[in-house]
Amino acid sequence: MKLSQIRYFVTVCQYGNMTRAAEEFHISQPALTKAIQALEEEFGFPLFDRSGKKFRLTAEGKVFREQAEELVDHADRVIRDMRELGNCRGKIHVVTMPNIGVFVVSGPLWQFQQEHPQTPLNVVETTKNSALEALDHETADIAVLISNRISREKYQVLPFFHSQVVYCMGPEHPLAGRKSVVFQDVLPYPMILEKNDSRQPPVIAKQLARRGLTGDIFLCTQQHETAFQMVGGNIGYFVMRELAERQPQLCWADLDEPEASLEIGLVWKKKRRLDSDSGTLVQFIKERYRLPV
């Protein structure tokens, strides 16, 4: 029995879904299934009831889940304690997403560093799934993410800022001067989309697909600077409002769609006790954004 197998099993139980658990660990579903089956062969009994369509634990699986969660929690505590004894002590490891990284790094994290120079930050931009995986494995202390759809059962989430996606365009764009637009308004024009995950389509593309709409996608990129340089003529760019506001030569309109609302929050592993430095960052955000203490 390996610790990785136990982590796989616990994650499958949390999601109730093999596919989602495999995605979290960035392995194939057959590889994950094989790891679970190896546990079952070692124990001599099935952990999951595979007789029906519903995903259920067996009686033995329920007993093992309780023990497995305790083992994972203990292993995580040991790893954290050893890291704090080593070079990681005294530094807060933060992960964030490229599409909000500029706002996060130059905003609240920069302000924290100015006021707490004795507590250095190590900030890394990565995909949302990789950021959550870093929290799970405790290679990161805290994440700053778009937190709308993050599980409150698995993670502690502290929303501290609300924004929205806007449609950014040049002054010569046919929609320039509009205060708001909907997807139907922008479909005739080439669009630039943010791409946070190389394995997943951009969020806007998925939202269009859910509505049965097809957009004229000119460019998908993780680089804001590149995107803003390409905005002109009838090309528009879907981007966070605070980033669009930094482009005085361009104009923008609110995207009047339900999914355009963005909740940005601090995220950390729910069962993890934050160290004093990470707690200082959480307290700073609460005070900076006047959140309940």
Image: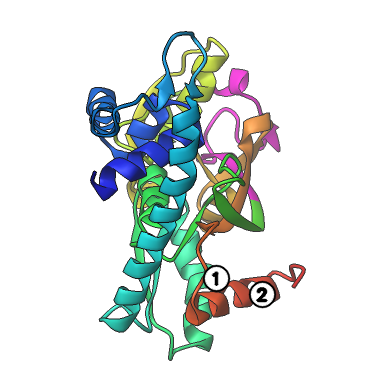
In the rendered view, tell whether residue 217 sits above or below residue 115. Answer: above
The answer to whether residue 267 is seen in the rendering is yes
Q: CA–CA distance between discs 2 and 1?
A: 8 Å
In the rendered view, tell whether residue 214 sits above or below residue 173. Answer: above
The magenta segment? 163-188
Q: Residue at x 49, y 9 (%)?
A: 53
The answer to whether residue 235 is seen in the rendering is no
Q: Residue at x 37, y 79 (%)?
A: 91
Protein image colouring: rainbow
Q: Residue at x 50, y 87 (%)?
A: 116
Residues 85 and 150: in front is 85
Q: Residue furthest front?
A: 44
Q: Indicate the position of residue 136 as horizontal and vertical percent values.
A: 40, 53
- The amino acid at mark 2 is Arg
Q: Residue at x 66, y 37 (%)?
A: 177
**Which residue is disc 1 drawn over?**
108
Please check the rendered image and state whether residue 169 is part of the magenta-colored stretch, yes or no: yes
**Which residue is disc 2 drawn over?**
288
- The amino acid at mark 1 is Pro
Quadrant where the N terminus sits is top left
Residues 271 and 176: in front is 271
Q: In this image, 151 relative to 41: left or right? A: right
Give residue 282's quadrant in the image.
bottom right
Give residue 227's quadrant in the image.
top left
Q: In this image, 39 relative to 217: left or right? A: left
